[in-house]
Image (cartoon, rainbow, N blue to C red):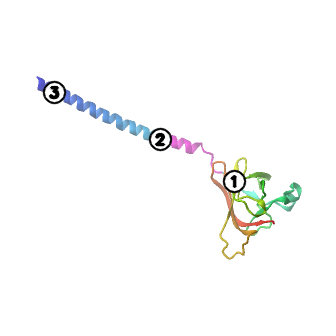
Amino acid sequence: MQAKWCAGAISGLLAGALMAGCDREDTARKAAEDARDIAMVERMSRAPLKPIIPAPITAIDVARYGLDRAGCAFRKHGQRDPLFLGGADDGFMRIDGDLRRYAAKQQSAQLPGGARTTYVGLSSWIDLARLPDAATGGDARHWPARLIIHDSLERIAFMADGTVTCRD
């Protein structure tokens, strides 16, 4: 009788252990499904990337808004008017017909003319990066560069290669 009882107890313990193992597998599977669902909701809740297309700042803009104090100007290759004007304290860019002001990030590198390499706006920021000079005749005040505009979610919304020209 004791052998029968032991066999029943052992089979009961084995069944309990098997069920506990199944519970762990179900818990792990449920956790993986929950993580996948959360990641999908987070991806879906992010606003889609909206490109930012700057327009050139004209001589009329420079005269009207007093932008002649800017230390450096970024121009796309083949364009006469700049896309960005940067100074020691602020920078300007025309987007969607509006002239937008960006604050110079004082912790960024300083360029000739007092301009900075990074400018921060309300919903985006701008980086100016120097490119290799590969026989372009670049010097301390004129060099090949890349203008990069980041959106509020740190995505690249615009990028263009051109030149930076700085004043004395």
The answer to which of 151 and 102 lies nearer the viewer is: 102
Viewer-side label of 1, 2: 1
At 40% from the left and 39% from the top, the residue drawn is 29
Quarter of the figure that contains the N terminus: top left
Which mark is first along the chain, 2 or 3?
Answer: 3
Q: CA distance from mark 1 to mark 3?
A: 76 Å
Q: Residue at x 56, y 45 (%)?
A: 43
Q: Secondary structure at mark 2?
A: helix
Q: Nearer the viewer, mark 1 or mark 3?
A: 1
Q: Is residue 87 left or right of residue 127?
A: right
- Please, what is the three-letter code of the amino acid marked with disc 3? Cys
Region of the chain picked out in magenta, as a range: 37-49
Q: State whether the magenta stretch is mostly helix, strand or loop.
A: helix
The mark lying in front, picked from 3 and 2, is 3
Q: Quadrant of residue 94?
A: bottom right
The residue where tag 3 is placed is 6
User: Quarter-wise, where is residue 148 in the image?
Assistant: bottom right
Decide which of 166, 122 is in the foreground and name it: 166
Circle 2 residue = 35
Cα distance in 3D space between marks 3 and 2: 43 Å
Tell me: residue 134, above or below residue 4: below
Q: What residue does disc 1 label?
A: 107
